[in-house]
Image (cartoon, rainbow, N blue to C red):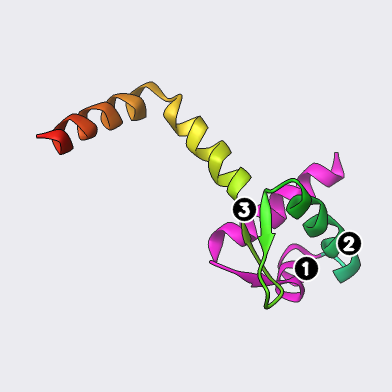
Amino acid sequence: MQIIGRITSVLEQISRKEELPLGEIAGAVGLKKTTAANILKALCSAGLLKKSESGKYSIGKTLVSLARSSLEGDTITGLAQDYAGALCAI
């Protein structure tokens, strides 16, 4: 589906920098500003992105939470976190 590719491209661009304005996102992924704005609005509504007061977009809390949950489910990562926690308690 075309929309999934567009969303993925938008998220990849934003993940490369701390904050990006609409125009830069649209240009980087080859979308019209109106199309990019609609995608960004939907991603913000879902909490995957957030929009700052200056109008720039960055990764949202929901996306961070999903990534964290994914990493915590990883056996090696989970073990490393357990050992790191134990070392910190010493």
Question: Mark 3: which amino acid?
Answer: Gly
Residue 60 shows which numbered tag?
A: 3
43 to 57, vertically: above or below:
above
Q: Is mark 2 on a helix, strand or loop?
A: helix
Label 3 to label 1: alpha-carbon separation: 18 Å
In the image, is 69 to the left or to the right of 21? left
Which residue is under mark 1? 26
Residue at 35% in and 30% down: 77
| In magenta stretch: residue 27 | yes
Q: Give the range drawn in magenta.
A: 1-30
| Image-quadrant location for residue 37 | bottom right
Q: How crowded is mark 2: few (under 14 residues within 10 Å), some or many (20 or more)?
A: few
Q: Considering the whole magenta stretch, tell me its main secondary structure.
A: helix
Q: Residue furthest left?
A: 90
Q: Which of marks 2 and 3 is nearer the N terminus?
A: 2
Q: Pick whichever of labels 3 and 1 is earlier in the sequence.
A: 1
Q: Which amino acid does label 2 sit on?
A: Thr
Asked whether the residues under the numbered discs 1 and 2 touch, taking CB atoms below 8 Å apart as contact, a structural biologist would say yes
Q: Quadrant of the N terminus?
A: top right
Kindly report which numbered mark, 3 or 1, lies closer to the viewer in this rendering.
Answer: 3
